[in-house]
Amino acid sequence: MALTTAPDPTRRGTGSVRPPAPRGGTGRIRHGEGLAGYVFLSPWLVGLMAITAIPMLLSLYLSFTNYDILTPWSEVEWVGLANYERMFISDPSWWHSVRVTLNFALIAVPLKLAAALGVALLLNRAWRGVGLFRGLFYLPSLLGGSVALAIVWVNMFNREGAFNSFLALFGIEGKPWVNDPDWALETLMVLAIWQFGAPMVIFLAGLKQVPTELYEAAAVDGAGKFRQFVNVTLPMLSPVIFFNLVLETINGFQGFTAAFVLSNGTGGPVDSTLMYTLNLYITGFTDLEMGYASAMAWVFLIAIAIITVIFFSTGRFWVHYSDGEDR
Amino acid sequence: MHPATATSVPDGRTYRTPLLRRRFLRGLLAAVVTLPLIGAAAACGDDDAASDGKVRLSIFWWGGEARAQLTKQALDLYTEKNPDVTFEKTWQANQGYFDKLATLTAGGNPPDIFQIDDNFLAEYAARNTTLDLKKYQDSGDLDTTKFPPSLLQYGVVDGKLAGLAAGENTQGLVYNKTLLDKNGLPEPTTGMSWEEHVAWAEQVSKKAGIPGTQDPSADYKAFWVWLRQQGKDLYSGNELGFTVEDVTKWFELWKGARDRGATPPPDVIHEGNATDITKQLVVTGKAATSWVWVNQMPELKKNTADELGVIAYPGDPSGQWARASMYWSIFRGSKHADVAADVINFLVNDPEAVKLLGTDRGLPSNLDLRRVISDDATDPAMKQSITVENELAEKFGESPQVPIKGHSKVKSELTKAAENAQYGRAAPAEAAAQFVEACKAAIVS
């Protein structure tokens, strides 16, 4: 979050780092401390290099080759920008997966945040048993991207599933939701929205930080509940909304597990659940076109980076930090 | 922080402390950085520990619990006879198997012996991942004299023997006998034309109230048999063996069947398109037939109380062939290829081993032993599949060429195109044109 190293003792944010304790000793000792710091960091640093940084750079290299997993490295051919050209020019299924993913993120992410905020507002009161409800609403997100949950979802939303039995109580004839190309992706969206617990908890924490005197002042000025929400709660909560928005958008784009399980790893029916990451996985591991899949991964990374930059650059128009700093 | 170090030197020469500590820390840093490397090097060293004549072979296959038990017993038998050879046995379900195999290969750590099927044999052989077994065949270390020639031939890719058939198998149309008997309906027979099959299925739908047949238009193995009966093939050399018109005819055949109510609604067809045995419509009761492999009969039988029958796919049965249900292949870089070849030879030719393995991977490739196994079979479902397969074997046509590189993409594109037509999102001709275009891109790249 707002992690800053500014040694400003008046700042009281949750994330701000306290200024260093009284510094004793000489520059040499501090140099030693720096080294010690690196030593303590080293397990993580080695892990970062070996598990993240080096493979990432290798995949950047592979994205310019025709690497197919089985061929030894020494026989891999450099193909220049061919993989990137193919993606943009001659691969309809790539464009299809982009559309599916955008469709998913544009609908599921706002609805999930709205659900999280709505429930957080309801649970931000002191009534008996509120803790229990917080726990219950948080529970689904603990199950996260689990395979078991996706299997349950498939069984709930197929032709004979519990959801259709429920609809039948009202005389409504259901659909084979997960096996219907018009509804399979929507079923995945509902699953994502249902797991709103994590942003909800963050919203709750944010709501607790809003000073009550602001509400009191607003009430004195004659603002009703709705005006208070729009003019006090939303602005005060905007940093938290921003944080949730960025994280959930990235999460939404990366959706994989549920789509994989629901479609038996195919993206079906008729490619309706062919999320970007699933398409990437199939390209790399089933079709054995790892070079092309690497190129897809890099385009994906850059796209997410651009979206995040856009969020940050528009953020200063609507995100208010209460500490009075002008950002 | 270590306050003690700053005060530990009584004469106040504190400059030594940081220096010492720095040295110590540097050593520590070096250790932290290099230790994993040493560990990795040591791990690599294990492979070479064969100096005492002991050999440890890694072997990898897909399948269920039953296959795992049988295979382990057969391998233990080999160890019993050759105490110097032990095995590192790894197995898993079919889903994800080839992802894992590809990843192991990429990591430079593939198993010495692995199970593979015709969907992937050419992908691996074309990339020189599999060892050419010809030299073992020539030297007699790998005895193939008792193999049906077409079955052996079906493991040859570009003139190299890329895999040795672990068993023989062929396409089988499985039907629910109990359901038919209950409704006084006739059983389908081998040799019925495709049109007759659809008409029969329409009858079943009307009388039994359950869709007569699964729509196999998304299933490459049904499409393949049908193509061969039209004098075409799935592949011809490095090109497609069919045209847009052929695919259109195939899709229209099944559109007609759907329109007549012979097949289930598209979402049920989609469910049945999963390769998982437990989801086949004939065992879930959502259709009267399923398009499977003959050797899957015993497994199918375990998932339903109804009696099942099995025949060839419709049309002339010479469209079918002695297909290797799966092969044993050896990794090209295996350090113990000679031993691995001997193990494969043992698995397909040793009477005791073959008896242990039974028909789990299809009918034994060795014809002499196949006869023995057939006579000894006690499981009725297994007996049934052996009988049917032996009958069909007399009518088999020539083996086609093994599917080429890009085949897995062709398979998934067929499913997509067929489902597009099934859900009514595209006309048969439209779906066929898209399919052929996608296939051409897939096999070129």
Image: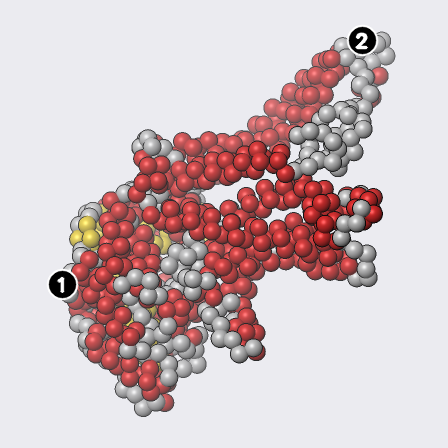
Residue A116 visible here: yes
Residue B231, disc: 1
Residue B154 visible here: no
Give the image location of residue B405, x and y in percent.
Answer: 27, 48
The residue most toward the left is: B231
The residue most toward the front is: A222
Residue A232, disc: none
Q: Quadrant of residue A132?
A: bottom right
Chain letter of disc 1 in the image: B
Residue at 40%, 37% in the rendered image: A295
Residue at 60%, 58% in the rendered image: A194
Task: Decide which of B346, A206 is in the foreground and name it.
Answer: A206
Give the image location of residue A184, x and y in percent.
Answer: 46, 61
Q: Is residue B330 left or right of residue A6?
A: left
Please, what is the three-letter code of the amino acid marked with disc 2? Arg
Q: Same chain for the residues at labels 2 and 1, yes or no?
A: yes
Please, what is the three-letter code of the amino acid marked with disc 1? Gly
Give the secondary structure at mark 2: loop
Read off the residue under disc 2: B13
* Front of the two marks 2 and 1: 1
Say which label, 2 or 1, has the lower sequence index. Answer: 2
The residue most toward the right is: B10
Give the image location of residue A65, x and y in percent.
Answer: 34, 34
Residue at 37%, 38% in the rendered image: A291
Task: Decide which of A66, B337 is in the foreground and name it.
Answer: A66
Give the secondary structure at mark 1: loop
Q: Is B352 drawn above or below residue B138 in the view shown?
A: below
Could you tell me which quadrant the N terminus of chain B lies in?
top right
Distance from disc 2 to disc 1, alpha carbons, whole Å, reads 95 Å
Give the image location of residue B362, x and y in percent.
Answer: 32, 66
Task: Decide which of A213, B232 is in the foreground and name it.
Answer: A213
Chain letter of disc 2 in the image: B
